[in-house]
Image (cartoon, rainbow, N blue to C red):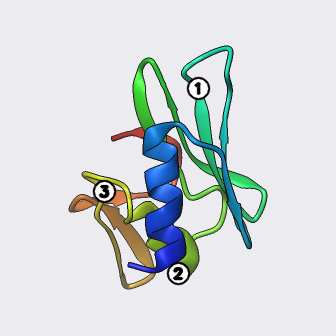
Amino acid sequence: MRKITRDSIIAFINGNNFKRGNTQVKTYAHSNYREFILHGNVIADMNENGLFISDGGWQTVTTKERLNGFPNVHIYQKDFQWFLNGEKWDGSRIKV
């Protein structure tokens, strides 16, 4: 896991703001809502209902690497198809 991924995931889980390069974590003081942003696209968000992820419209190596930093998330690609925790996944927003 890359250092930027580890640092940003820790910030996200702890509810801290973070920004380095193309990766940003935004937390909102008025609620428990937080966003994980890559290249300006939200690829993960968390609220009182849990953690949700998506590919943000871009199935890239970097997106996959950042998402794989989250607990209970394992994404891999086979024959141009993404799989999330062993199931085919089209990248749309899903609770994990």
Image vertical order of residue 46 relative to residue 67, above or below: above
Quarter of the picture holding the C terminus: top left
Q: Is residue 69 visible?
A: yes
Q: Residue under circle 3?
A: 73
Label 3 neighbourhood size at 10 Å, few (<14), some (14-19), many (20+)? some
Report the residue at 56% width, 58% height from top: 55
Name the residue nearer the viewer: 30 or 90.
30
Q: Position of residue 8 (x, y in %)?
A: 53, 59
Q: Secondary structure at mark 1?
A: loop
Question: Residue flagged by tag 2: what amino acid is it?
Answer: Val
Image vertical order of residue 54 relative to residue 20, above or below: above
Give percent across and percent down for residue 24: 68, 56
| Element marked by disc 3 | loop
Q: Earlier in the sequence, mark 3 or mark 2?
A: 2
Q: Vertical placement of 76 versus 70: above or below? A: below
Q: Is residue 15 above or below residue 29?
A: below
Q: Considering only order in the chain, which callout, 2 or 1, is on the residue closer to the N terminus?
A: 1
Quadrant location of residue 87?
A: bottom left
